[in-house]
Image (cartoon, rainbow, N blue to C red):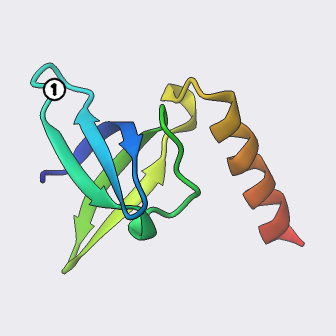
């Protein structure tokens, strides 16, 4: 896997199937527990490496799933309380 933007194509119990957003359309699997948000099919995430761990970031402006936007909004509200 390499750093970049990925779209979540499918999710099973423990892994998510990711397809790169760039023109090469490479596919990788990624552990669901390693995402920093409640990941959903259709999300666009940025993934990069910091030391030995992979980090993720939900890319709100590139995600088309309304469900993902709602989950992310609720998470941010709960974190502020």
Q: Which residue is mark 1?
A: 25
Q: Point out the residue furthest to the right here.
A: 81
> x, y (%) of residue 44?
43, 36
Q: Residue furthest bottom?
A: 52
Q: Secondary structure at mark 1?
A: loop
Give the residue displayed 44% in from the left and 70% down from the top: 33
Q: Is residue 59 left or right of residue 10?
A: right
Q: Residue at x 83, y 66 (%)?
A: 78
Q: Is residue 4 left or right of residue 33?
A: left
The quarter of the picture where the C terminus appears is bottom right
Q: Which quadrant of the structure image shows residue 67?
A: top right
- Residue 23 relative to residue 41: left or right: left
Looking at the image, the residue that sits furthest to the top is: 23
* Whole-percent x, y for residue 19 in the image: 25, 34
Residue at position x 40%, y 69% in the image: 34
Whole-percent x and y of residue 57? 45, 53
User: Which residue is at a point 15% across and 26% down the rendered structure image?
Assistant: 25
Question: Residue 21 sits in which quadrant?
Answer: top left
Q: Crowding at label 1, few (<14), some or many (≥20) Cα neighbours within 10 Å?
A: few
């Amino acid at each position: 896997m390499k750093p970049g933007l990925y779209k979540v194509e499918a999710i099973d119990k423990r892994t998510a199937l990711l397809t790169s957003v760039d023109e090469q359309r490479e596919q990788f699997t990624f552990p669901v527990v390693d995402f920093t948000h409640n990941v959903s099919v259709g999300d666009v995430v940025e993934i990069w490496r910091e030391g030995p761990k992979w980090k993720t970031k939900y890319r709100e402006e590139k995600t088309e799933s309304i469900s993902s936007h709602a989950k992310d909004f609720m998470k941010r509200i709960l974190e502020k309380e």
